[in-house]
Image (spheres, grey):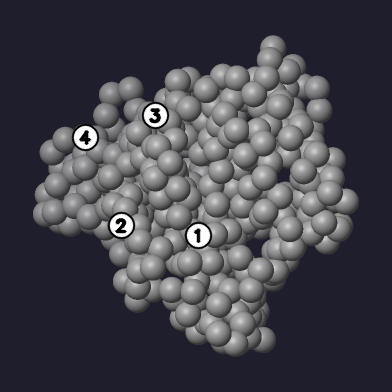
Amino acid sequence: MIFVCSLMFAQQTTFKFDFGGSRVENGYIPITKNSKFDRKTGYGFMDISGLKSVDNGGNALTGDYITSDKPFYFSVVIPEGNYDIKLNLGDTNGTSETTVRVENRRLMLDNVKTKEGEILEKTITVHVKDSIIRNHDGEKIGIVKLKPRERKYLHWDNLLTIEFNDKAPKVCSLIIQPNKTAKTIYLTGDSTVVDAQYEPWASWGQMLPYFFVPEKVVIANYAESGETLKAFEDRHRIDKIWKKLRPGDYLFIQFGHNDQKYGNSEKSGYRKRLKEWIDKAKQWGAIPVLVTSMNRHVFDENNKIVNTLDDFPEAMREVAKEENIFLIDLNAMSKTLFEAMGPENSKKAFVYYPANSYPNQPNALADDTHFNTYGAYELAKCVVKSMVDQKLPLSKFVSKNYKGFDLNKPDAVEKFYWPESIFMESLKPDGN
């Protein structure tokens, strides 16, 4: 009987959760400080230590909430797909301050503040994925070959996980509903694109959702550390996308950092595979977009960025021109951005930290390829800027969170706000 209930729950796609105390709005599932996640029930908090249920009386839905002094995570067993999540945030007797991320630290809402007694309804749109490849009838026909480290990720685990963070996160309610109409942007790439799970590592792909209008666009990040175009094929990651791609969706392609280990763009088969992917995306009625790999943190004696990516950025530019498709030249933009920051200041965008800045980190971190959250955020703004400047059809769905960006005047790192998640690791991602 328990198995049957659990199976039925796993197929459910619409949920209404009332966070708080014992009073529950009609038609909602009650969530209290003791609602620990259990696969049999299909929902709950990853860790209930430190959770507080507060009830101010009044409205059953918005008069109470769950809060904590540390980040807390709520998970739901749910089939893969795109979902709109409506959140009521705030405190009828006080103020609140909430940052919301999903899965592997994918940024959705940043530092949402409510005034005294104010309740704000916010909507986010999330892509949930699993590793099973299905045909268009939903039948299993294959599987993505995950790396061992991926099996610990929050985005392959058949769950939707929402992270509530910040100085005073207060969650009153949560509604999950399928979204069948949003344009999906599929991201492919390596460690500079992936949804990185652990602080201090980050990539532009996990910052991108913050800059798009919810309900209209959803980001589906399939990038993984260490991958090349060939490895993305060999592990069936791209096969997974081909079976999900729909007319009007977008396929963003950014590879180069790891491909260069196998020779120039001709020898490694880079150009050939790019063209094959572009052709197939067009066959599905999708819109391919090429993204050149951003520069590494390598400067010459004149404080100018040195190209360490051989002919790969130029090869991608040429392919985009030959195929007459959109190109986001992140390589050129990052050169301008990093040179504007300068050799020393730009280290603050990369994973440069003294020893013992993070748990189990006896040695200093000095990584010239991988970014921290600030660097990832700045690069995401570069990607959005290019969309807007080129008037990509997607640009009409860019949200008000994007207020323009001058590559020669990057945001001050001192003003960048990112309350850290609880997951931390000093181990460098695959690839370089």
Q: Earlier in the sequence, mark 1 or mark 2?
A: 2
Q: Nearer the viewer, mark 3 or mark 2?
A: 3
Q: Which residue is mark 4?
A: 60
- The answer to the question of whether label 1 and label 2 lie on touching residues, with beta carbons closer than 8 A, is no
Instruction: Identify the residue at image location x=77%, y=43%.
Output: 271
Kindly indicate whether the residue at mark 2 contacts the one at mark 4 (C-beta within 8 angstroms).
no
Where does residue 410 sit, x and y in percent of width and height? Answer: 38, 68
Tag 1 near tag 3, CB within 8 Å: no
Q: Which of the marked residues, 1 or 4, is nearer the chain's N terminus?
A: 4
Question: Residue at label 2?
Answer: 111
**Mark 4 surroundings within 10 Å by alpha-carbon count, few (fewer than 14), some (14 through 19), many (20 or more):** many
Q: Give the alpha-carbon distance from disc 4 to disc 2, as whole Å.
A: 25 Å
Q: Nearer the viewer, residue 155 or 404?
A: 404
Residue, disc 3: 216
Q: Would you identify the image quadrant in which residue 370 lies?
A: bottom right
Q: Amino acid at mark 4?
A: Ala
The residue depicted at 48 percent of the width and 50 percent of the height is 383
Looking at numbered disc 2 in the image, what kind of residue is underneath it? Asn
The CA span between labels 1 and 3 is: 27 Å
Quarter placement of the C terminus: bottom right
* Chain-order first, disc 4 or disc 3: 4
Q: Position of residue 296 (x, y in %)?
A: 63, 69
